[in-house]
Image (spheres, helix red, strand yellow):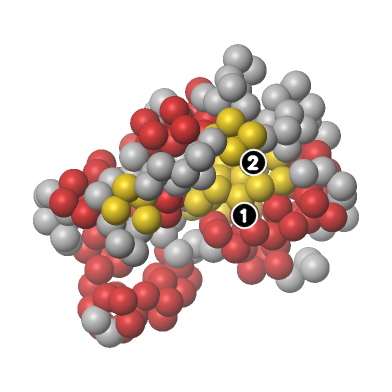
Amino acid sequence: MGIGDDMVRDVISRDLGHPLRVAIDGVTASGKSTCARWLVSAVATQGRPAIHVTMDGFHHRRAYRYRQGRASAVGYYRDAYDFDALCTQVLIPLGPTGSGEIRRRIIDLASDEPVEDPPEPVPTDTIVVVDGTFLHRPPLPDYWDYTVFVDTPMDVARARGTARDADALGGEVAAGMAFDQRYHAACRIYLDEVDPRARATRVLPGIDSLLSMG
């Protein structure tokens, strides 16, 4: 049995009486979103309902997330994401005493405008997969039922990220500088401060190893 099949079996085996809250964590451009989509599809194939929530919908607005400077690593680590909103809109409602209704986003990232989508009911047997960076930062571990750390080497993630974001960040050289100064510098703070590998339910040795198994 491959690592992917084993993880799917492990996730599906957990029945807590409320939706299972799964975190897919990793450094920027590690393949978290790819892993989350893969897991949702694999779970659905086994007949269990599953939905995907991305932290792209839980950014702070630009003025807040860049308040320490666009190149600030500490600013990215501390100010990029609204984890309080993730808790109140997703994680707490899905818990044992929650309403069972969530909102998958609070902001339209492209327009930088807040949104207030209607609450979405989530059946109790659903597996809810959330992908994002810094997902083992306190107090989030109090609310996850299962966590995955995608342990892609930093140089591999950097190459993937600079190629992916070159157009948005002003070219490959500028993208590389952004990863070195802001995104991955922030991830190094996170790795040192939180040690998500030690906290995760499961550590994946890079998304490529998962996808290669079918």
What separation in Å lies between label 1 and label 2 (alpha carbons)? 10 Å
Residue occupying the far top of the picture: 97
| Nearer to me, 113 or 109 | 113
When the figure is inspected, residue 103 is found, relative to residue 8, above or below; the finding is above
**Residue under label 1:** 36
Task: Identify the residue shown where x is 80% and y is 68%.
Answer: 214
Q: Amino acid at mark 1?
A: Ala
Q: Position of residue 100 (x, y in %)?
A: 62, 27
Q: Amino acid at mark 2?
A: Val
**Does any portion of residue 188 appear in the rendered image?**
no
Mark 1 vs mark 2: in front: 2
**Residue under label 2:** 128
Quadrant (top left, top right, bottom left, bottom right) of the N terminus = bottom right
Q: Position of residue 129 (x, y in %)?
A: 62, 45
- Give the quarter of the image for residue 202: top right
When the figure is inspected, residue 114 is found, relative to residue 174, above or below; the finding is above
Q: Position of residue 143 (x, y in %)?
A: 53, 26
Q: Secondary structure at mark 1?
A: helix
When the figure is inspected, residue 209 is found, relative to residue 66, above or below; the finding is below
Task: Identify the residue shown where x is 35% and y is 58%.
Answer: 109
Task: Identify the residue shown where x is 73% and y is 37%.
Answer: 126
